[in-house]
Image (cartoon, rainbow, N blue to C red):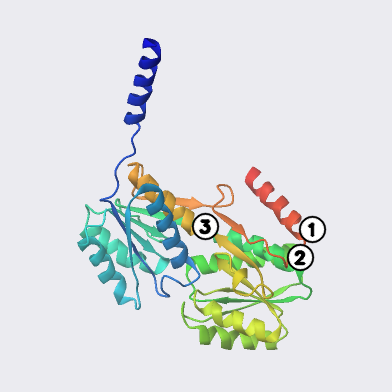
């Protein structure tokens, strides 16, 4: 009996020593790019990642939406004024404003999705994704599924993430069919659905059967025209087929939610390293493609084999 009580006592002490850290006073604030928190793109994914971290680790979370470029600076300043423990900027467009904020507030901790810097500030962690790999998988899926040599690409703004999607998509298309031609246009916006609709209408009228759209809110206009004309589209960032199951062939997925959640965990564990870039790729399951009912089992097996090959390199 004494031995039993001793074992129970040791077990109780061990359990009490493993008591989880109280993070209830930790505030993580996201400063979003234009398009809003429900943009069905990287803003939404980033917020979903923050919500998962909030549930898992008991932190407080908040987001600030940007409607214009001028909002980036003021939102970052507001996030600091809120006494945020970690501030995450969402999107390439915030890079310059974040660089200034990081210099002005050296004691604050920052991270950014898709940031671009000549030199990353010491208090900033840059979270990047290999969109080229995700686009490549979507290109393979599109060319394997659809006939014809004419495909389209509509970008929101010509920033590195958008260009990476385009180049990867074209690489995948040409690997399956070297005769494919890719028409490319930009909406110069991440929110103008009407502009996306106008460009897509022109492309579909020119016998293009499928368009990849990497434009945030611009994509909604592309999907609308595709539905009207019985054509196909390819989404980016997050799984988009649920929006229009008969139209959206696949999506080039970057797991921004995973990146945000992992970043928050690293911060809480005191393992978040400033002045560095973390890259999410196929090798660490940071990017992938969407398997939809529009893709055959043969096509899915073909692409999954390619993924295994890339992981083994």
What is the x, y in percent for residue 9? 34, 20
Q: Secondary structure at mark 3?
A: loop
Q: In the displayed structure, does residue 253 sit left or right of residue 78?
A: right
| Disc 3 target residue | 255
Q: Residues within 10 Å of mark 2 (few under 14, many from 20)?
A: many
Disc nearer the start of the sequence (2/1): 2
Q: Nearer the viewer, residue 23 or 80?
A: 23
Q: Quadrant of the N terminus?
A: top left
Considering every residue shown, the one lying at the far top of the view is 2
Residue at position x 70%, y 63% in the image: 140
Q: In the displayed structure, does residue 258 sit left or right of residue 252?
A: left
Residue at position x 35%, y 72% in the image: 65
Q: Residues within 10 Å of mark 1 (few under 14, many from 20)?
A: few
| Disc 2 target residue | 144
| Picture disc at residue 298 | 1
Q: Nearer the viewer, residue 286 or 161?
A: 286
Q: In the displayed structure, does residue 258 sit left or right of residue 201?
A: left
- Disc number lying in front (2 or 3): 3
126 up-or-down from 100: above or below: above
Q: Nearer the viewer, residue 163 or 52?
A: 52
What is the x, y in percent for residue 240? 59, 69
Q: Nearer the viewer, residue 190 or 13?
A: 13
């Amino acid at each position: 009996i004494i031995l039993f009580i001793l074992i129970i006592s040791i077990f109780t002490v061990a359990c009490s020593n493993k008591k989880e850290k109280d993070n209830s006073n930790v505030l993580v604030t996201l400063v979003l790019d234009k398009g809003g928190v429900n943009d069905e793109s990287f803003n939404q994914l980033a917020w979903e990642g923050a919500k998962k971290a909030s549930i898992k680790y008991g932190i407080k979370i908040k987001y600030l939406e940007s409607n214009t470029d001028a909002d980036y600076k003021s939102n970052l300043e507001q996030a600091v004024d809120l006494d945020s423990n970690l501030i995450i900027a969402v999107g390439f467009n915030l890079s310059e404003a974040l660089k200034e904020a990081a210099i002005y507030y050296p004691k604050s901790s920052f991270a950014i999705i898709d940031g671009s810097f000549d030199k990353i500030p010491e208090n900033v962690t840059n979270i990047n994704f290999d969109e080229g790999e995700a686009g490549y998988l979507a290109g393979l899926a599109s060319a394997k599924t659809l006939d014809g040599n004419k495909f389209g690409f509509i970008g929101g703004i010509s920033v590195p993430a958008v260009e990476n999607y385009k180049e990867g998509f074209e690489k995948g298309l040409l690997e399956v069919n070297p005769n494919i031609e890719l028409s490319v246009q930009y909406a110069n916006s991440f929110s103008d659905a009407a502009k996306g609709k106008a460009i897509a209408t022109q492309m579909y009228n020119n016998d293009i059967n499928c368009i990849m759209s990497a434009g945030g809110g611009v994509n909604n206009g592309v999907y609308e025209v595709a539905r009207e004309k019985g054509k196909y589209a390819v989404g980016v960032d997050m799984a988009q087929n649920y929006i229009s199951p008969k139209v959206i062939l696949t999506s080039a997925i970057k797991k921004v939610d995973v990146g945000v959640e992992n970043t928050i965990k690293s911060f809480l564990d005191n393992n978040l390293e400033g002045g560095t870039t973390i890259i999410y790729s196929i090798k660490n399951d940071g990017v992938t493609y969407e398997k939809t009912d529009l893709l055959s089992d043969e096509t899915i097996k073909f692409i999954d084999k390619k993924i295994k090959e890339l992981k083994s390199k």
